[in-house]
Amino acid sequence: MEFECQERAEVAIVGQGLSNQGAELRIGDGSVEVPCVKLCYHQKKATLVAPSDKDLSTTTTTTHRYTIIDLPQALISEILNCLDPKELGLVSCVSTCLHRLASEHHAWKGFYCERWGLPVVFGGKTSEERSWKELFIEREFRSNTFLGRHSIDTLYGHTEAVRTVFLLASAKLIFTSGYDCIVRMWGMEEGLSIAASKPLGCTIRAAAADTKLLVAGGTDGFIHCWKAVDGLKNLFDLTGFQKEKTEFRLWEHEGPITSLALDMTSIFSGSWDMSVRIWDRSSFKCIKTLRHSDWVWGLAPHETSIACAAGSDVYIWDISSETPQAIIHGAHEGNTYSLARSHSGDFLFTGGEDGGIKMFEIRKHGSETNVVLISQWMPHTGPVYSLSFEFPWLVSASGDGKLALIDVRKLLKTNRRGLPKRVSSRIVEPPQRMLHGFGSNLFSVDVGCDRIVCGGEEGVVRIWNFTQALEIERRTRALKGMRLENRMRRRRMQMEMNAKSGRPDQCSIAAHKNPVNGDRNRAWHTKRRASGKAKA
């Protein structure tokens, strides 16, 4: 048998010349059992090999048992590095030593960042006070709240349809705008209006923000920008009352701006002038222009590449060379209106005029890039105008006035490095949940902090708040833990009383007399025969 780590170390367990004695690696029970086997460890390769005939002659009557914790810690770390989160959690339950090694393993940071990026909100604690395993488990727990109870907050203030919403989770702020030409800032927790900009002179179809910069794109072809003000609680001075000049515009596009995105160094903008422009954030000058053959409806950048929806096609560009790596022709019937991308960049989601949603995997093999269709959904009867993704939930807003929530975990599996990979292709299945309550078009949606924010033709902003489900689930788990602890305490007290009085343990006797599988099945069949006789 051979067990290999493809990265920095390699473990090979080789059984040669052993009759009925195969080398065996058992991670589940915390042991490595290798009869009559030597352990040789090198810097690049650790090998368990069968001894020579001379060694076998001296050890035929002896069986050596090695535990995995006898291996060097560097080698154990490489073995644990090949496990997924579930397996790593199971290994931590084997022994005290493995619990320490598995709980403090650096792979937890990789698992977290591949799904959600670096954590921003820690619930009152800093990252130094909590381990990456704790952060990962909490975030996985929070991801189940979208199936629970919710409350709806309705924000009034816009006088016309809302075309764009953006949730800045790190600052707990929401930015909205639309046909009334005004950018509004709301508090995420209270749902109260904080500030509103002056009228910008045209419809605002796109907005994006981080803690340093807020941008809004207008149909007149400009990008209106606000720099964050140091010391200001809500980051941006939309009203212009501050003395500092933090408000300015970028002009290059020749048509309405339909999509915006930010990263640490660049601003990305897409327009109906059939181009995507990339701006340098330090100089605020356009440094690259990506030309398309149709109107640009959406974009989704990730590190050195950017996905753009132009007409019915989807382009994946290499930013440095300004060349398309792959093109998805006819992704939807009609225009492809919306894009979303996983944090790792491997998965791309598209929404189109046909009401469908598709999931693609972006595979890179050296210099080649291939795009493979993974799954597709048809949850809407109207165009899908907006998509937002936060692992594992994909949320869509449509012209039929509905929101669809799709859990993509069933379509993903975790390989030995913790990266999601394709399971099956072209699966069509219904979404896990649909949210109703709107009578008209929904144009934009965003997700984060256990909330879904959307805006549409009604001119109001709605926040679907799932924190109630989170609190209910926390209380339920706490009560279950208390009941289990009380049960175990009573069990220990009963065992101590039985030991003092010399009586046998009644639970052990009952378990011995009534094996779980055998007697339960026998009793079930007996009851079934008895009920059959009664009916007869």
Image: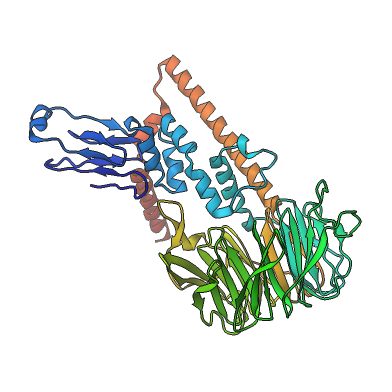
Q: Residue at x 19, y 35 (%)?
A: 37
- Tell me the quadrant of the picture where the C terminus can be found: bottom left
Q: Is residue 503 above or below residue 103?
A: above
Q: 61 or 287, which lies in front?
A: 287
Q: Position of residue 18 (x, y in %)?
A: 13, 40
Location of residue 278 (image quadrant): bottom right
Q: Is residue 296 above or below residue 143?
A: below
Q: Residue at x 46, y 47 (%)?
A: 86
402 sits to left or right of 356: right
315 sits to left or right of 30: right
Number of numbered markers: 0
Location of residue 279 (image quadrant): bottom right
Q: Position of residue 268 (x, y in %)?
A: 66, 67
Location of residue 243 (image quadrant): bottom right
Q: 298 or 124, which lies in front?
A: 298
Q: Residue at x 82, y 71 (%)?
A: 459
Residue lying at the far top in this picture: please name it.
500
Q: 211 or 104, which lies in front?
A: 211
Q: Is residue 455 visible?
A: no
Render colour scheme: rainbow
Q: Position of residue 335 (x, y in %)?
A: 62, 82
Q: Is residue 108 visible?
A: yes
Q: Position of residue 123 (x, y in %)?
A: 68, 42
Q: 85 or 267, which lies in front?
A: 267
